[in-house]
Amino acid sequence: MSFRLAGRSTMLLRRASGLRIVCHAGTLWVSEYRQPEDSVLHAGEAITVDSDRDVVLSGLPDAQVALIQVAGAP
């Protein structure tokens, strides 16, 4: 799934284990529930969520994002 996340918009991903979050354009803020550090992804960067926690995404100011379920993940 690919979409544009506008600035000041947020998206909640519930139980995001095994989800690869890719920033294709812009800047994306990623906050994982109960983790002390947030991540900021720039165009071309990605992370894979390795826990079953909720994740909040926000465009800074906006971002083109892809969500990819990693093979073998629940």
Image (cartoon, rainbow, N blue to C red):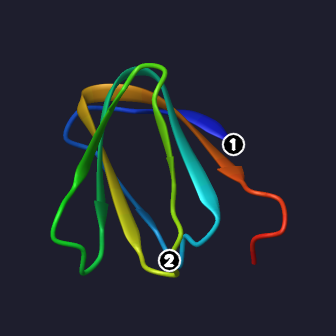
Instruction: Provide residue 26's location: percent of width, then percent of height.
Output: 34, 20
**Front-most of 20 and 64?**
20
Q: Is residue 67 above or below residue 3?
A: below
* Relative to 68, 9 lies left or right: left
**Front-most of 28 and 47?**
47
Q: Where, quadrant-wise, is the C terminus in this rendering? A: bottom right
Q: Residues within 10 Å of mark 2 (few under 14, many from 20)?
A: some
Q: Nearer the viewer, mark 1 or mark 2?
A: 2
Instruction: Provide residue 41's location: percent of width, then percent of height.
Output: 34, 34
Instruction: Provide residue 11's location: percent of width, then percent of height.
Output: 39, 56
Residue 1 disc label: 1
**Front-most of 69 and 58?**
69
Q: Amino acid at mark 1?
A: Met
Q: Where, quadrant-wise, is the N terminus in this rendering? A: top right
* Tally of numbered tags: 2
**Residue displayed at 19% across by 41% down:** 8
Residue 58 disc label: none
Q: Which residue is mark 2?
A: 51
- Asked if marks 1 and 2 touch (Cβ < 8 Å), the reply is no
Q: Is residue 34 above or below residue 71?
A: below
Q: Amino acid at mark 2?
A: Ser
Q: Give the structural element (helix, strand or loop) at label 2.
A: loop
Q: Give the structural element (helix, strand or loop) at label 1.
A: loop
